[in-house]
Each structure stands twice: as structure tokens, then as C-alpha cells.
Amino acid sequence: MDVDPTIFKAYDIRGIYPTQLNEAIARAIGRAFVTLLQAETVIVGRDMRTSGPALFAAVTEGIRTQGADVIDVGMVSTDQYYFACSKFGHPGMMVTASHNPKAYNGFKMVKQMPYLLSGDEGIQDLRRLVEREEFPKPLRAGVQRSVDLMDEFVAALLRLIDVSAIKPLKVVADTANGMVGPALIKLYGALPVTLIPMYFEPDGTLPNHGLDPLQPENRAELEARVPQEKADVGFAFDGDGDRFFVIDDRGKFVPGDFITALLAQYLLRKHPGGRVVYDVRSSWAVPNLIREAGGVPLVERVGHAFIKRRMAQENAIFAGEVSGHYYFRDFNFADSGMIPSLLVLELLSTSGKRLSELLAPLENTYFVSGEINSTVPDAASKMEAIAKRYADGRIERIDGISVSYDDWHFNVRASNTEPLLRLNLEALSREKMEAKRDELLAFIRS
């Protein structure tokens, strides 16, 4: 079969419908998935995208044609889909393109929870099967049944927090017409929370704004609404609900590593001495607060495949990535957008402080650049030039190059998919951060 190889990404399949990804390709992907994993049953869910019903029908037809049964979990968030894969113990396919624009669709594929099919772990093997279209003859045709796990999912999430500790709080939540709204209504309905919903209706035409809250234009309205409503906090979720972002009581966006640091500190009260995984881009706030709370900080490469494997190896209680992914041992090491939202509510309730007060010590100590991308013709040689230029620092090569000095540090990584270098830099003063950021960008772009 003639298929665009670029749709087979590092962690999922993603392409524009119907030019790069259509029903015929989806059918072949379903057959290849069953063949590759020798699956007998496959969990399948989908998000709200307009191409979802057609691709769902095609991929499930491919799965059944190849002799496996389908458990249809319906239109769900990705963490609801992970919950289903954990509950039934089967591999799964989620029809979603996460936070990509509405023209896209794709598949997130679970091998066995918490492990997803990824570039090194099966996606390229899947591509080769699709291209060859040589599938073994099945002994039978699979059957399909539907299940609704919404109430069970909500109950499971509520068990992860102390519901009795939650105080009356006002929350503005923006789910961007993605998949989180319906579950959030049920979840927060069990709490003494005044929920002000923004764009809770799943709608694949995306009538209001894009699905990625890391883009400032997609969260601007929420940032304005929080102080307008005199709310305690604002929450934003990406399209398929596996990423989570926070706006504080001032209407200020909170960096993901600061949320990781605060949640790690809070969870270590419940799990003394626990291990916490964080990614190489993170602020020093993360390992410092983990150590202060008596925990063990573990730095890891960026990306869920690395984070989940390390968590399982170390039996870590929690992991956080700068990009808004938060992972929980008590959720089978998977990431969820809704669980960290509950923990932030619990943290605010038990601390008796506003979020801006909890953030003040971090904001006054750690000055982060955020991730800054630069287009470079040859990423590898530029990284070697950076290593040479900053050879007087402590250099680590866990993921790209990380260089540390006593009062500042940085990480530079190459993009998986584009000719880009990504810089994350932090210093212990704003002046030093801005000076070093500008110095490095000038060097990278020279």
C-alpha cells in the first residue's frame, strides 16, 4: 500500500485527513496492529474530530477482519481510554490527533498499559506491515461490543484524592471543545466546587480556539476570565485531555515545571521518601523541592516512552514534564489531565493559601526562559559546537546537551521531526537568565 511514511511519528500516527490518512489506510493500520501484537481483543476509542466516525469505523473493521474482537469505549478523553486499557488488560487504539489542528487525525496505540507503541517500540514495524499488506489469514472474524466506563472512571479518579479535604473553590475550566468537558462535569459535581465551564461541548469544528494551551492565543481568554470571575484558579486541557495547564488567581500562566514541583512536594507528604521523575528541561525548582520534601528526584529524557518506563522501573509515585504531561503510579503510570487538576484543588484546600502565594518563593528564586526554538541547518554539529563553547560547565548527555553552572543551566535538544534546536535555560536571577538566553540564542543562530 502506498502510504506517506511521515505520518508514523515518534509516539503515534498523525496526518491530515483524507490526504495523508484515510479509511483504506486506517483499515490496513487496524489489521497491522492485530498482526504485530497478535492481539485477540483491542480497546478502541475516539475523540470529537469530524473525521473520527469514519476512521473509527475503518480501523475497527480492520481489527475485526484480522480476527480480533473490539471493545468500543466510545467518544472519550485519552485518560479514559488508558483507564479502559488498564481495566481490561488489552492493547488499544485511540483515534485522535491530540492537540493538532482540526484537519488532522491519527492513532495513539497502547501495547500493554502503561506502554504505548512508539518509534523504537513498534510504530516503524507497523508501517512496514501496512506498506506490504501481507496479513496472515485469520481463523475467524472478530466481534464488536460497546461499553460505557464514564461513571467507573470518575469514581476511580475521586479515589485518588481526599474528597473530604476539598474546600469550596471557584474554578474556571477551558476544555477547548475537546474531550474533557463531559467527564469534568461529573467529576467536579462530586466536589464543593463552583465550576465555570468554557467550551465544554465536544465539537470537532473547533469553533472557539485551538487545542494546544501552550500556544498563548489559546489560553488568553481563560487568563482574562480567572480574575474577572474572582476565581481561585483556571484549568486548561488539551484536545484529548492527556495534558493539563494552570492559570493562577492573578490570571498568570504557571510553567509546567512549577506545577510538577508543587505537586511532587504535596504527593511526597502522602508517600514519604517516594521517587519522582522529571524531564531534562525542568527548572531546578523540581529536584530542589523534591529533595526538601524527602523524596528522590530522577531526571529522564523528554517523552512518555522514556518517562513511563523509568517510572515503572523505579516504582516512582509521580512524574511531570514541562509540556503539561503528569503521570501517576496510582493510575498505572499513565498520564492524565484530570488527576492533576484534582490534586491542585486538594493542595489549595489543605494549604489555605492562594496559588500565587504558593508560587511566590519559586518565582522569586528561579527564572526560566521557557522553550525557545531555533531553525538550524545541522542540529548535530551545532550541538557539538555548543558543547565545546561551554566545556567549562558540567555537561550531561541524557537528552541533547545539558550544561550546568552554579547559578544557571541550560538544555539544548534537537526536534524529532523538524530542523530545530530547542533551548530551555534557567538562572537564579532574571538579569543572568536574560543575558545567558540572548548569548546562547546568538550562538545557536550564528
Image (cartoon, rainbow, N blue to C red):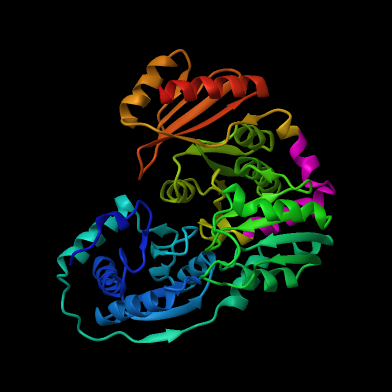
Q: Is residue 133 left or right of residue 391?
A: left
User: Residue most toward the top?
Assistant: 392
Vertical order, 26 against 412 (above or below): below
Viewer can see residue 161: no
What residue is at 54 percent from the left and 59 percent from the top? 242
User: Residue most toward the front?
Assistant: 207
Q: Is residue 422 left or right of residue 5?
A: right
Question: Within the magenta stretch, is there residue 56?
Answer: no
Q: Magenta region: which residues?
A: 339-360
Report x, y in % for residue 133: 17, 69
Report x, y in % for residue 169: 82, 59
* Residue nearer the viewer, 18 or 405: 18
Q: Is residue 170 left or right of residue 283?
A: right
* Residue nearer the viewer, 162 or 376: 376
* Quadrant of the frame with the N terminus: bottom left
What residue is at 45 percent from the left and 42 percent from the top? 302
* Residue nearer the viewer, 266 or 285: 285
Vertical order, 193 against 55 (above or below): above
Question: Within the magenta stretch, is there residue 342?
Answer: yes
Q: Is residue 360 left or right of residue 66?
A: right
Viewer can see residue 341: yes
Q: How many marks?
A: 0
Report x, y in % for residue 114: 45, 59
Q: Quadrant of residue 445?
A: top left
Vertical order, 408 against 337 (above or below): above
Report x, y in % for residue 143: 34, 87
Main SS category, magenta section: helix
What residue is at 49 percent from the left and 72 percent from the top? 84
* Quadrant of the frame with the C terminus: top left
